[in-house]
């Protein structure tokens, strides 16, 4: 026979022993009686507190003397004072998995939006407020680390050739906002291969291997114009900030401070191997095309070198981190360079 609507079969915990005893809860309006082998007690209904409904889990009724009752969910419990009415909505969600699944999808979509849009916007906002002196220090320390660890070696390029390229670089960058801070440096980098890198604060490094690959000085200037675009856009700093924010969030969520330490200590290698976002590459390309044309140079030189680098990269991809590993070439980029040359 089923229990009457005003009674519930419960397990009674007296607060002293961890083992419960069977009992019956009887409700009579203003009073609740608990009758069992180890208890026969009455309590004012208003003195009870019922735990929130969580799916199909058992619920607990806290008694004013410190004891508690455990029982399956029962509609009679809704007549007693609740620990938190707001949990009713949570319980409603827990019993409707499609709604919960939709909530997870919305949460993941929000995280994705934050990563792809919110995080870059935050990094751009922060980068604009970092004094260039600090940015230069970061670039100098990064370059020093790469030199000390012999990732970069002294250039074997003839001094006269270095002077020629440095003069052209100065002419390209002379009227730009970052002009006072630009430094063009040459390095031999057999393990890196044909590459050019923009460091925070205005340092631009081009490898001997890149210069050797170029068939004309204009092609070298085209690559340098692209790196100037990264400097003017402060892309290296923004990239570091984005990775650091991600590491900080990960460290917070996982309570693992090592992820933040690794992000900070890995900056030099990250800059050498960094793959800029498609947006950064497009910005640097467009900046370079405009800068080249303003100095009487055609963007066609950029397209020509990119095509040659593509062939070089395919042959060396297993053993080199070339320019195309960090600045991926696409047919679209080459097409845009050719289109810019025609306009």
Image (cartoon, rainbow, N blue to C red):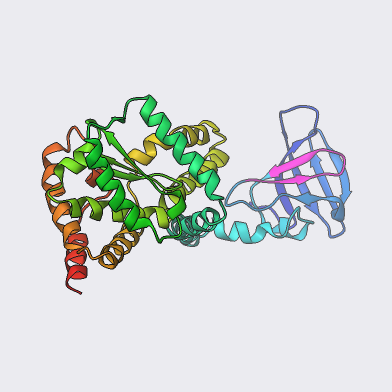
Q: Which of 44 and 142 is in front in this view?
A: 142
Left or right of 126: which side holds 52?
right
Whether residue 153 is in magenta: the answer is: no
Quadrant housing residue 232: bottom left
Residue 40 placement (x, y as % from top left): 85, 40
Per the rendered image, the range of residues in magenta is: 58-70
Give the residue displayed 46% in from the left and 34% down from the top. 141
Give the residue displayed 50% in from the left and 54% down from the top. 123
Q: Nearer the viewer, residue 8 or 210?
A: 210
Give the residue displayed 32% in from the left and 57% down from the top. 172
Left or right of 309: which side holds 236?
right
Left or right of 276: which side holds 308?
left
Q: In the figure, 23 relative to 127: above or below?
A: above
Residue 156 placement (x, y as % from top left): 22, 31
Whether residue 70 appears in this view of the structure is yes
Residue furthest out toward the bottom: 343
Whether residue 59 is in magenta: the answer is: yes
């Amino acid at each position: 026979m089923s229990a009457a609507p005003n009674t519930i079969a419960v397990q009674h915990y007296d607060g002293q022993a961890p083992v419960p005893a069977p009992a019956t809860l009887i409700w009579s309006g203003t009073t609740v009686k608990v009758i069992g082998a180890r208890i026969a007690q009455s309590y004012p209904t208003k003195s009870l507190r019922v735990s929130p409904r969580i799916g199909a889990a058992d619920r607990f009724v806290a008694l004013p003397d410190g004891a508690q009752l455990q029982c399956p969910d029962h509609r009679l419990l809704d007549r007693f004072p609740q620990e938190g009415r707001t949990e009713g909505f949570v319980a409603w969600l827990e019993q409707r998995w499609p709604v919960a699944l939709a909530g997870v999808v919305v949460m993941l979509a929000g995280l994705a939006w934050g990563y792809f849009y919110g995080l870059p916007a935050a990094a751009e906002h922060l980068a604009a407020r970092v004094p260039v002196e600090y940015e230069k220090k970061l670039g100098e320390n990064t370059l020093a680390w790469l030199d000390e660890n012999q990732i970069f070696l002294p250039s074997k390029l003839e001094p006269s050739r270095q002077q020629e390229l440095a003069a052209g670089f100065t002419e390209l960058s002379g009227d730009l906002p970052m002009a006072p801070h630009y430094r063009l440096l040459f390095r031999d980098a057999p393990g890196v291969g044909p590459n050019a890198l923009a460091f925070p604060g205005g340092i631009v490094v081009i490898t001997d291997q890149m210069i050797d690959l170029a068939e004309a000085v204009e092609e070298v200037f085209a690559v340098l114009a692209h790196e100037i675009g990264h400097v003017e856009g402060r892309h290296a700093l923004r990239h570091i900030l984005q990775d650091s924010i991600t590491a900080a969030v990960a460290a917070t969520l996982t309570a693992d401070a090592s992820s933040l330490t690794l992000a900070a200590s890995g900056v030099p290698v990250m800059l050498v191997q960094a793959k800029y976002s498609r947006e950064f590459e497009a910005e640097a390309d467009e900046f370079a095309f405009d800068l080249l044309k303003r100095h009487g140079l055609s963007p066609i030189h950029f397209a020509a070198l990119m095509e040659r680098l593509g062939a070089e990269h395919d042959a060396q991809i297993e053993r080199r981190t070339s320019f195309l590993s960090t600045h991926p070439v696409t047919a679209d980029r080459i097409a845009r360079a050719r289109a810019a040359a025609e306009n």
